[in-house]
Image (cartoon, rainbow, N blue to C red):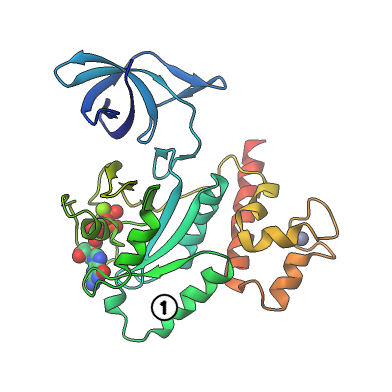
Amino acid sequence: MPVGQIVKAISGFYYVRTEAGDVLQCRARGVFKFEKKKLTPLVGDVVEVDATGLGEGVVTSVQPRHSELTRPPIANVDQAMVVCSLRQPRFQQMPVDRFLVHAEREGLEIVIVLTKSDLIKDGREIEQVREIYQAAGYPVIATSIHSGDGLEAVKERLAGKISVFAGQSGVGKSSLLNQLLPNRQLETGSVSKKIGRGRHTTRQVELLPLDGGGQVADTPGFSQLSFQGMEPADLGDCFPEFRGRADQCRFRGCLHLNEPGCEVRAALENGEIHPGRYRHYETFMNEIKEALMRRY
Ligand SMILES: Nc1nc2c(ncn2[C@@H]2O[C@H](COP(=O)(O)OP(=O)(O)OP(=O)(O)O)[C@@H](O)[C@H]2O)c(=O)[nH]1
Ligand SMILES: [Mg+2]
Ligand SMILES: [Zn+2]
């Protein structure tokens, strides 16, 4: 039975690229389950298909995933390109930090991609953002589709991997991909002047092959991201700049809030951890605790 990968899903149809390179339009047969959980096939899933002829088929099984994101919905990616614009809309640290937690939970490689650098007159702003994230251990690439800034660096990071472009609507995910995929023109949209937000131009997740190996997924912009199902003790692990220090906290299970002998707080106080990142840790911790209270 041929094995393939779901590259797109639209209203109950799964588009499966087989090893032979054909794309079959498939329905799913039956209910798939892992660990007793009902599972809906996602873009990125490796599946078995029954070819029924004329470019059509049926998905008969889904293989276990090595990673899974709910927003954007995609399975088996290796790397997340966290895309955020510098202007139109203005850079916002909160949604980036929020998404980073989700990507860290799935153990993804992460690159922060800043877009629209042509709209910035003073390079210091880029340097400030770079400092925040490089101190946390993330590579940061500033890009512009107009000046060509950073495009080669993004290409190098994508080579040979399965990556997802994730970020809010209007930050320029599809525009950037159009620069990297000369044979594909993805639809792009304008940013509303009035509310400074994108218009949700991209409607579905699509996995696209890259010249020279690797694949990349364009995804719809999203804004709401919650921490449902997370435990307070999980959060620190999703901040790479906390991880090495947490082992040295006085108490095991230290949540790095008010505990004495906390090495994360010590690093914050001597300026090794960025205060904005720590503030977001506290915000997310409160959200996780509130969600837990509602559950019981
Ligand atoms: N000045 C400038 N504008 C850019 C750049 N990249 C994208 N844009 C503009 O930003 C707007 C939104 O771009 P899209 O690529 O549609 O954004 P998106 O992230 O794919 O948005 P959704 O599909 O809605 O999630 C368009 O008007 C683009 O022309 C850039 O590097 N510089
Ligand atoms: Mg788009
Ligand atoms: Zn601690």
In the image, residue 135 sits, relative to residue 295, either above or below, namely below
Measured as percent of width and height from the top left, residue 278 is found at: 63, 66
Task: Inspect this view and state whether residue 73 appears.
Answer: yes
Task: Inspect this view and state whether residue 193 appears.
Answer: no
In the image, residue 130 sits, relative to residue 108, either above or below, namely below
Q: Is residue 146 left or right of residue 262?
A: left
Q: Residue furthest front?
A: 212
Residue 269 or residue 279, whichever sits in front: 269
Q: Residue at x 33, y 59 (%)?
A: 155
Q: Residue at x 39, y 31 (%)?
A: 45
Q: Residue at x 28, y 66 (%)?
A: 195
Q: How many marks?
A: 1
Q: Quadrant of residue 283?
A: bottom right
**Label 1 belongs to which residue?**
126
Asked if the residue at label 1 sits under 8 Å from ligand 1, the reply is no
Look at label 1 and name its amino acid: Ile
Residue 3 or residue 97, whichever sits in front: 3
Measured as percent of width and height from the top left, residue 118 is found at: 27, 77
| Helix, strand or loop under label 1 | helix
Q: Residue at x 36, y 60 (%)?
A: 156
Q: Is residue 64 left or right of residue 113?
A: right
